[in-house]
Image (spheres, rainbow, N blue to C red):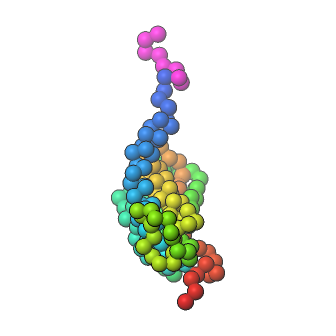
């Protein structure tokens, strides 16, 4: 039948999303390695915060930084009203010496991202990039929260 379309004819929305995620992957890996190379302990994470801010720049998000913590909160407003969803990643490292021999190993003595927070932070940046590109199709708001640890017990001893 000429001119008739069925649901089976519609493009799969995940195909475009996966293709875009694959296109973004090298940049996300680079961000992760930048964070991994310069781990910070506790709640004062200025280098990590600046890396996140640079990675979110140009996405059209409303961005706020913490006043007493090195947090970043970025808000994506969808095209239509709807619910709010929060996506969160920790940014701090562990007080541990890295002996992996990786090309992007920690350059900070006594600190490393053995916890995976570098990966979580990079993945959240990737999610922000993917969703910002689809803003016109989103209902509601997405809040991206990049946080240092909540507990003072996570502070490095001096």
User: Which quarter of the picture shows residue 105?
Assistant: bottom left
Q: Residue at x 39, y 58 (%)?
A: 30
Does residue 68 appear to the left or right of 55 in the view shown? right
Nearest to the observer: residue 76 or residue 156 = 156
Magenta highlight on residue 29 = no
Residue 139 location (% of width, % of height): 53, 48
Give the magenta part as a residue range: 1-8
Residue 2 location (% of width, % of height): 43, 11
Q: Residue at x 61, y 75 (%)?
A: 150
- Magenta stretch mostly in which secondary structure? loop
Q: Residue at x 64, y 81 (%)?
A: 153
Q: Is residue 134 visible?
A: no
Outermost residue, top side: 1
Does residue 157 appear to the left or right of 109 in the view shown? right
Q: Is residue 22 visible?
A: yes
Q: Is residue 121 above or below residue 127?
A: below
Q: Is residue 23 above or below residue 148?
A: above
Residue 63 location (% of width, % of height): 44, 66
Outermost residue, left side: 58
Q: Residue at x 43, y 44 (%)?
A: 22
Quarter of the C terminus within the rendering: bottom right
């Amino acid at each position: 039948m000429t001119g008739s379309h069925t649901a089976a004819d519609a493009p799969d929305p995940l195909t475009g999303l996966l293709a875009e995620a694959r296109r973004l992957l090298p940049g996300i890996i680079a961000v992760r390695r930048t964070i991994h190379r310069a781990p910070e302990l506790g709640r004062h994470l200025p280098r990590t915060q600046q890396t996140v801010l640079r990675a979110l720049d140009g996405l059209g998000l409303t961005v706020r930084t913490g006043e007493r913590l090195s947090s970043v909160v970025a808000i994506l407003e969808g095209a239509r009203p709807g619910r709010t969803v929060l996506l969160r990643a920790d940014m701090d490292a562990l007080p541990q010496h890295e002996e992996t021999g990786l090309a992007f190993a920690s350059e900070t003595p006594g600190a490393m991202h053995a916890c995976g927070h570098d990966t979580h932070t990079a993945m959240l940046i990737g999610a922000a990039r993917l969703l910002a590109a689809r803003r016109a199709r989103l209902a509601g708001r997405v809040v991206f929260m990049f946080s240092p640890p909540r507990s003072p017990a996570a502070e490095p001893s001096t």
